[in-house]
Image: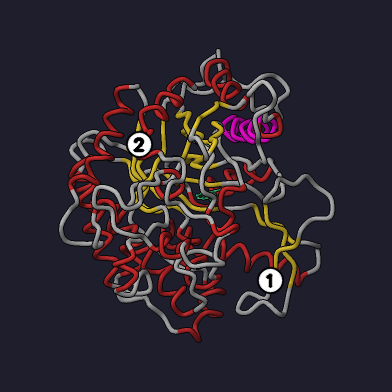
């Protein structure tokens, strides 16, 4: 039931999302061992301006202040991730009590502020020790991830209900092992194919481990990076290419989880690489979800391209349109995506687990950070969420990426996504005008004319 005052249901989750490596810093504290992102960022030439997450937003030390900011915004949910090498420095074996203790306090701190925790187990920071044993391309990593999931759920499962196994496995698998722009920075299609399959299998094993360990009603899902894919022209070649691009970037992870199978045409194209699938894997991966997390930023316009290996499809930048520092701004794509997911996959519930906009924010002469463009971006996307809900599509929440300005992976600190500005030299936080706007929306709903 929509609440008459906001136009959103009273149990709608309003939150912000973050991830461990992007905000925590304290990379060598309290027994945390390196992750692949520590190794990658300390390899010269991998990251813009050779930046790294050693200190990031220093959230490890400032988490209480950060949770206060979240509370002041009126958020009733917070999506954060756990650093595997903080909890299990060697990836498996002995649990590091101090590392797990940090997240234990964080969960208590959220609950004390009336904020529901959404825990992501894996947001790309694989323990380096696991990578040294083969990383995601090695099947043994699946069992290690299950062990890690079990350790975390055992400790937090009495207070945490909402769990996200993986964030955007496409980027862990394909970005890290094939495109090479993400850690561990390999360019090896066979490794990427195996990594992707093992990520999916590890999702299912972790989901079961969480359900076993939870002392309350666990809700388990995963967060996928999804875009609305459209052909660059109505030519048959472009339409086919858009289909393949969609199969790779959207359906390669959706279909196994939601239907228990890989997209057939693409599986055929990848067949020369060999298969990591063992008997029973696909049934396991088809483990039922409680919700599907949607990370949406933009659409993809695609044309046929002989030069792109396997796919023969390439993304093109539209000639006209509105662009952020990173992507095209295309709010209707969020409705198109939610509608399509609802019709094609019948998930029990959808959550927008990430949506946001990078800007080169800076305080003005009065020390205010005015980010009207971000407000416009968020308002127009939220209006699309509302449009989807009006059609009966069950969307249970909306998480802005991100709470704080943070380390934006290969692009370093140049891309500011936060509702809260961070001066990385002093670590001073300044809520931007978007934080005040979000607060008003949570209380009163979207202003008229936000679409
Ligand atoms: C998503 C990632 C998140 C952040 C945003 C901008 O792909 O999940 O960590 O980098 O993009």
Q: Position of residue 73 (x, y in %)?
A: 49, 22
In the rendered view, does 285 fall on the left or right side of 246? Answer: left
Task: Point out the stretch of residues depicted in magenta.
Answer: 375-391
Q: Where is residue 76 in the image (x, y as percent from the top left)?
A: 42, 25
How packed mark 2 is, by other alpha carbons closer than 10 Å (few <14, some 14-19, many 20 or more), is few
Q: Hey, which residue is sitting farthest right in the picture?
A: 320
Q: Quadrant of the C terminus?
A: top right
Q: Name the residue under label 2.
A: 61
Q: Residue at x 68, y 64 (%)?
A: 242
Residue 389 among those drawn in magenta: yes
Q: Which of marks 2 and 1 is in front?
A: 2
Residue 427 among those drawn in magenta: no
Q: Which residue is drawn at 63% across and 66% down?
A: 245
SS majority, magenta? helix
Q: Where is residue 127 in the image (x, y as percent from the top left)?
A: 32, 61
Q: Mark 1 points at which residue?
A: 313
Q: Which residue is drawn at 68% across and 71% down?
A: 313
Is disc 1 placed on a helix, strand or loop? strand
In the rendered view, does 183 fall on the left or right side of 131? Answer: right
Q: Quadrant of residue 447?
A: top right
Say which mark, if any, is on residue 196.
Answer: none
Which residue is nearer to you in this view: 316 or 52?
A: 52
Calculate the distance from the C-alpha at mark 2 to the C-alpha at mark 1. Answer: 45 Å
Q: Where is residue 418 in the image (x, y as percent from the top left)?
A: 55, 36
Q: Hey, which residue is sitting farthest bottom in the picture?
A: 272
Q: Quadrant of residue 356?
A: top right
Q: Which residue is drawn at 25% across and 63% down?
A: 144
Seen in the picture, residue 151 relative to 8 is either above or below; the reply is below
């Amino acid at each position: 039931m929509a609440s008459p005052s906001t136009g959103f249901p009273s149990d709608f989750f309003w939150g912000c999302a973050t991830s461990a490596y992007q905000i925590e810093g304290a990379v060598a504290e309290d027994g945390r061992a390196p992750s692949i992102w520590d190794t990658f960022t300390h390899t010269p030439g991998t990251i813009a301006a050779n930046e790294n997450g050693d200190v990031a937003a220093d959230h490890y030390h400032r988490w209480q202040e950060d949770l206060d900011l979240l509370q002041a915004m009126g958020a009733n949910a917070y999506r954060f991730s756990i650093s595997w090498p903080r909890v299990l420095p060697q990836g498996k074996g002995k649990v590091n009590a101090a590392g797990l203790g940090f997240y234990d306090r964080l969960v208590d701190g959220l609950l004390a502020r009336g904020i529901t925790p959404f825990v992501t187990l894996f947001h790309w920071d694989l323990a380096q020790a696991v990578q040294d044993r083969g990383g995601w391309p090695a099947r043994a990593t699946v069992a290690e991830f299950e062990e890690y999931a079990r350790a975390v759920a055992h400790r937090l499962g009495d207070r945490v209900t909402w769990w996200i196994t993986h964030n955007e496995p496409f980027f862990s698998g394909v970005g890290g092992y094939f495109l090479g722009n993400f850690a561990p920075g390999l360019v090896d299609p066979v490794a990427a194919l195996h990594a992707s399959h093992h990520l999916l299998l590890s999702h299912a094993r972790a989901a079961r481990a969480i359900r076993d360990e939870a002392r309350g009603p666990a809700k388990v899902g995963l967060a996928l990076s999804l875009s609305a894919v459209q052909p660059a022209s109505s030519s048959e070649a472009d339409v086919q290419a858009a289909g393949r691009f969609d199969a790779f970037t959207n359906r390669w992870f959706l279909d196994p989880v939601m239907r228990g199978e890989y997209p057939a045409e693409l599986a055929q194209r990848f067949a020369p690489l060999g298969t990591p699938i063992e008997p029973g894997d696909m049934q396991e991966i088809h483990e039922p979800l409680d919700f599907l997390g949607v990370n949406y930023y933009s659409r993809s316009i695609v044309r046929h391209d002989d030069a792109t290996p396997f796919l023969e499809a390439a993304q093109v930048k539209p000639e006209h349109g509105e662009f952020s520092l990173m992507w095209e701004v295309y709010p209707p794509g969020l409705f198109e995506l939610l509608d399509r997911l609802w019709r094609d996959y019948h998930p029990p519930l959808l959550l927008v687990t990430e949506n946001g906009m990078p800007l080169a924010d800076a305080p003005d002469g009065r020390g205010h950070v005015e980010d009207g463009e971000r407000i416009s971006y968020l308002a127009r996307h939220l209006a699309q969420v509302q449009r989807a809900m009006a059609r009966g599509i069950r969307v249970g929440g909306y998480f802005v990426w991100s709470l704080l300005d943070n380390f934006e992976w290969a692009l370093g600190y140049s891309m500011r996504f936060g509702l809260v500005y961070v001066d990385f030299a002093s670590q001073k936080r300044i809520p931007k005008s978007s934080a005040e706007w979000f607060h008003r929306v949570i209380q009163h709903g979207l202003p008229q004319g936000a679409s």
